[in-house]
């Protein structure tokens, strides 16, 4: 695979997703990279995926079929079950989430038809994690809004998010990168600001529409 280095720009130029050829990302450079390397990228592991910058992670995830998407989340959650220092209640709660992610969970038609049901499950799951298990918002975000298996990876992104929150959004017509109903934007919020909605790989275990921007 071609070496592909990304610099995380605080004031990156946003691109519109109106062009039909932008299949995996609104950024034409990222989209071209994923398109050219799709076969090889379909074989990478979760650990390899999360070594990329967040925008590239989502584009690669978007290029996978529904089975690969499900396997990625199951692998991440099972890794935490095996390697995390969890209580019995925490283990059961994560296992409940694994059981929730059915074989066809990431099929496009299921995503479109089951948004309300999975939103209700997500609300109950997060509520229990917060109120009964005492998990902080940042840990919940690590668990269900990112594919990282190591919290240090999430903390690195969180630091970048805090820096981005001080930047001014100058192009509301750019690509959406979060879900307004359930996502994590650090100390900012996910807002619908006229961005170009794209694939369903935002929010709750990357199965909800990208319909907002962190602002």
Image (spheres, rainbow, N blue to C red):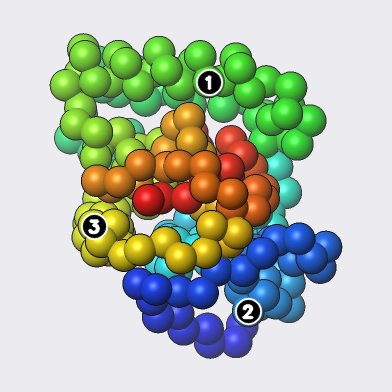
The residue at which mark 1 appears reads as 119
Q: CA distance from mark 3 to mark 2?
A: 25 Å
- Asked whether the residues under the numbered discs 1 and 3 touch, taking CB atoms below 8 Å apart as contact, a structural biologist would say no
The numbered mark at residue 76 is: none
Q: Image point 45% across, 42% down: which residue?
A: 191
Q: Tell me the SS state at disc 2.
A: helix
Q: Position of residue 164 (x, y in %)?
A: 31, 62
Quarter of image, res 10 = bottom left
Q: CA distance from mark 1 to mark 3?
A: 27 Å
Q: Position of residue 104 (x, y in %)?
A: 71, 30
Looking at the image, the residue that sits furthest to the right is 20
Q: CA distance from mark 1 to mark 2?
A: 33 Å
The residue at which mark 2 appears reads as 29
Quadrant the N terminus occupies: bottom right
Quarter of image, res 118 = top right
Q: Is residue 39 left or right of residue 193?
A: right
Which residue is at the front of the view, 16 or 150?
16
Which residue is at the front of the view, 78 or 210?
210
Q: Which mark is in front, 1 or 3?
A: 3
The residue at which mark 3 appears reads as 162
Which residue is at the front of the view, 35 or 17?
17
> Earlier along the polypeptide chain: callout 3 or callout 2?
2
- Position of 42 relative to 116 (above/below): below
Q: Tell me the SS state at disc 3.
A: helix
């Amino acid at each position: 695979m071609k070496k592909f280095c990304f610099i995380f720009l605080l004031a990156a130029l946003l691109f519109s997703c109106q062009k039909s050829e932008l299949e995996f990302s609104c950024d034409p450079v990222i989209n071209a990279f994923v398109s050219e390397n799709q076969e090889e990228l379909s074989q990478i592991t979760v650990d390899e995926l999360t070594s990329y910058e967040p925008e590239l992670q989502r584009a690669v995830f978007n290029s996978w079929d529904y089975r690969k998407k499900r396997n990625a989340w199951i692998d991440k959650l099972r890794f935490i079950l095996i390697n995390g220092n969890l209580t019995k209640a925490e283990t059961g709660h994560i296992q409940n989430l694994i059981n929730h992610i059915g074989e066809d969970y990431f099929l496009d038609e299921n995503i479109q038809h089951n948004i309300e049901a999975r939103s209700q499950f997500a609300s109950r799951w997060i509520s229990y994690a917060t109120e009964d298990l005492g998990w902080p918002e940042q840990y919940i975000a690590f668990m269900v809004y990112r594919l990282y298996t190591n919290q240090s990876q999430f903390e690195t992104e969180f630091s970048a998010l805090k820096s981005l929150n001080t930047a001014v959004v100058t192009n509301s017509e750019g690509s959406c990168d979060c879900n307004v109903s359930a996502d994590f934007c650090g100390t900012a919020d996910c807002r619908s600001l006229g961005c170009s909605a794209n694939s369903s790989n935002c929010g709750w275990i990357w199965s909800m529409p990208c319909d907002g921007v962190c602002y």
